[in-house]
Image (cartoon, grey):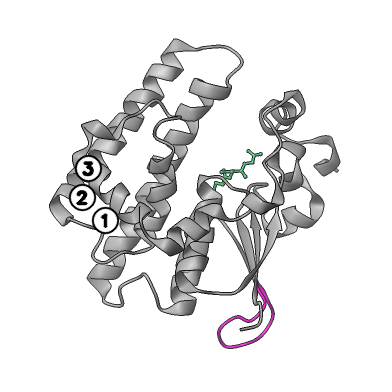
Amino acid sequence: MATMIDLYYAPTPNGWKISIMLEECGLPYTLHRMQLGRGDQHRPEFLKLSPNGRMPAIVDRAPTGGGAPVSIFESGAILLYLAEKTGRFMPRDLRGRYDVIQWLMWQMGGLGPMLGQNGHFLIYAPEKVPYAIERYHREAKRLYGVLDKRLKATGDCIAGDYSIADMACFPWIMTHKAQGLTLDEFSAVKRWYATLRARPSLQKGLALGKDDGPMVPMDAEARRIMFGVTAPPHTQK
Ligand SMILES: N[C@@H](CCC(=O)N[C@@H](CS)C(=O)NCC(=O)O)C(=O)O
């Protein structure tokens, strides 16, 4: 099949959501590997696709129904788009669909941002701020608990069959060690995590970009670009 999708990506939890979905669907794509520590996300060409200056983003050059290419930013929106395009990993019935959508939104509005802050204050912040570290650690554990309770009730997957809700949550749960969390306290999450981890397509998605060399390190330049300024000089008018 000819390549139809351009993927703008770096190997991070939000990037992996999309590489996993593309691999699970078997959709052909062209990888545009980004170096976040060198500011690829702030370049004017990329900001046209993703005005928030964050990856991932996609451009679909062969959208359903034809017409101009469709470009999408925000990983949750991209997952919904790809599910609609392929008719996969999303139930068709009303209740099933919104069950998946509400857990996808929970990931996008809760699990992802809170773990993002937890990781920032734990690993990257130049000073240790006990209040912030404790606040986000508590919140991260609370969210793990919410997921655990859900999976204890549902069994193998978050909402019905394996879906984009599982793909959205998995990469963030994968970072648990670096986040200072253990799955031992969350038996249903631990079981779900091990089951998903064994999927060959998911593993292929996680490996995307590894052959293109590592991410640049979080050196002083990367910290300045990612944490030090809200609007880098080359994006200012
Ligand atoms: N809500 C966005 C978040 C995207 C996001 O924060 N991406 C990070 C990498 S995981 C990024 O591009 N960071 C670049 C930066 O902070 O400058 C999504 O889910 O797509």
**Camera-side residue of 83 and 102:** 83
The residue labelled by disc 3 is 148
Q: Of the residues shown, which amino acid type is indicated by label 3?
A: Asp
Name the side, left or right, on which 156 lies relative to 15. Answer: left
Would you say the beta carbon of the disc 3 residue lies within 8 angstroms of ligand 1?
no
What range of the chain is rendered magenta?
Answer: 60-70
**Looking at the image, can residue 221 be seen?**
yes
Find residue 60 and report its image quarter: bottom right
Q: Is residue 214 above or below residue 141?
A: below
The residue labelled by disc 1 is 158
Can you tell which mark lies on residue 151?
A: 2
Q: Is residue 181 above or below residue 198?
A: above
**First along the sequence among labels 2 and 1:** 2
Find out whether the residues at labels 2 and 3 contact each other: C-beta distance under 8 Å: yes
Q: Residue furthest bottom?
A: 65
Mark 1 crowd level (few <14, some 14–19, many ≥20, 10 Å Cα): many
Q: Of the residues shown, which amino acid type is indicated by label 1?
A: Ile
